[in-house]
Image (cartoon, helix red, strand yellow):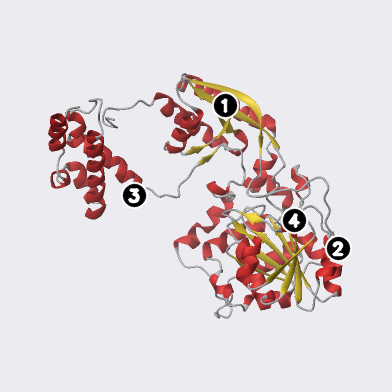
Amino acid sequence: MGEDVKHDLLARIPSITELLKTSVATRWLAEQPQSLVADCLRQAVAEIRSSILSDRAGRCGPIHASVDSVLARATKLMQERVAPRVRSAVNATGIILHTGLGRAVFPAQVVDSIVDELKGYCTLAIDRETGERIERDELVESLLIELTGAEAATVVNNNAAATLLVLAATATGKEVIVSRGQLIEIGGSFRLPEVMAQSGARLVEVGATNRTHLKDYARAITPNTVAIMRVHPSNYRIVGFTSEPSLPDLAKLAHEHNLLLIDDLGAGALVPLERFGMPHEPTMSESIKTGADLVLSSGDKLMGAAQAGIIIGRKDVINIIRKHPLMRAVRVDKTCLMVLERTLQLFRRPDQLASSHPTYSMLTTPTETLQTRARRLLELIQPLAPKLLARIENGVSYLGSGSLPTQAIPSVVVTVEMEGLSASELAKRLRLDDACIFTRIEQDRVCMDMRTVADAQIDTIAQALRRVANAIDTPLASCT
């Protein structure tokens, strides 16, 4: 494109003042601040100007510099700016506790039960009988005691915070013994040694990566030792030539030397997972019965509640933890406590979890049901999006979020391909669609796992595939 043509097109781009007088901008100004409206218009103009300047093939024409073109771009920008960034999504990845997608799905009855409290005031930190202030973690303490058999319990905002607080309250300036095979790194590159360093505790590593013996712990005990800590490797497994002392042996050794035994379970199982067809995972009550003085876990993994760090154990130690200055810095808010309390109540009836709790419902959905779900999706796709090639295949799901990392769960997937569109581009378009569908890619095909897709979302997925398959580039979208 010649420079004279580009200059003419650039001159045609309307001014911000002119654009602000249009009916479209007037509607925006009735609902949004002028600064936001003007910013979207300026950005739209800048994008069009850039497209024209970089156009070497002569694709740009007067239509691309028109008022309608600018407003079309600005409309998209405005929608992006005012739409909530945290929004609903369809999880078709097969990862039940998907960290990026919010981990556990809250039980519907839990969400419904907190609506009124969220709209008004609530009894977050006050005793109804006396009218006196109470500590907010007391709201869930009795439930945690009931479900685990611990003497006392408290709650903070996540399990890393629980580890930091426990060590700061009990081991500052003292030694804590941990096996080398348990020096875990959790999401976001946060490593246990670094958390311990922040707490003021001194880490004492014992054993080897794959084998640690009770005698390794015994030899490491000094007059400055205050605790032995066992950290459950939630997000990995070491297999083969391995060994580690049992929790009863660690408890006996710790208590013989008047040390604390801290058991970080990570995933936070409250009930035996065998009843849901999964391998055994240490439960919090088992750890307490075995002799752990403190047990730590997450609240948004196997509990399937809000993000939280659960601390249960000896009452005298929990009281020390409650009084530490960090407690206020890592305390939870009312929404977390509401969700946690009501979700914990569901565990009073573990026989009903498969129907009352989404996490356990997804774990136990039979593959026959998933096949039915997949066939329904296929039946909808074929007439709505004939350009797509879709198939039903066997697949595997995972619990996710560092829980049972190697345990594959048989599942059913619908694979989708589109001629002329790569799997990564198709997956991206599904994510950016109004339905916001997240999938996985295997063998250069988009896979939608039916285990994490609800029946009510099947039509939503089909309509999104129709939109993606039928989408075409419009002249107003770009001229480069």
Disc 4, SS: helix
Rendering coords of residue 5 (x, y %): 14, 29
Say which quadrant the C terminus sits in.
Answer: top left
Disc 2, SS: helix
Looking at the picture, tell me which residue is in the foreground, 2 or 310.
Answer: 2
Which residue: 63% across, 76% down? 322
Disc 3, SS: helix
Residue 133, above or below 116: below
Residue 214 is marked as: 2
* Label 4 crowd bin: few (<14), some (14–19), many (20+), radius 10 Å: many
* Label 2 crowd bin: few (<14), some (14–19), many (20+), radius 10 Å: some
Q: Do the residues labelled 2 and 3 touch (CB within 8 Å)?
A: no
Q: Are marks 1 and 4 in contact (CB under 8 Å)?
A: no
Give the distance between the C-alpha atoms of the residues marked 1 and 3, in whole angstroms.
Answer: 34 Å
Q: Are marks 4 and 2 in contact (CB under 8 Å)?
A: no
Say which quadrant the N terminus sits in.
Answer: top left
Mark 1 or mark 3: which is in front? 1
Give the distance between the C-alpha atoms of the residues marked 1 and 4, in whole angstroms.
Answer: 39 Å
Disc 1, SS: strand
Q: Which residue has dot 4 on it?
A: 181
What's under tag 1, amino acid-wise? Answer: Thr
What's under tag 3, amino acid-wise? Answer: Val
The mark nearer the N terminus, 1 or 4, is 4
Q: Can the viewer see residue 242 in this picture?
A: yes
Looking at the picture, tell me which residue is in the foreground, 195 or 38.
Answer: 195
Which residue: 64% across, 53% down? 301
Give the distance between the C-alpha atoms of the residues marked 3 and 4, in whole angstroms.
Answer: 47 Å
Give the distance between the C-alpha atoms of the residues marked 2 and 3, in whole angstroms.
Answer: 58 Å
Mark 3 or mark 4: which is in front? 4
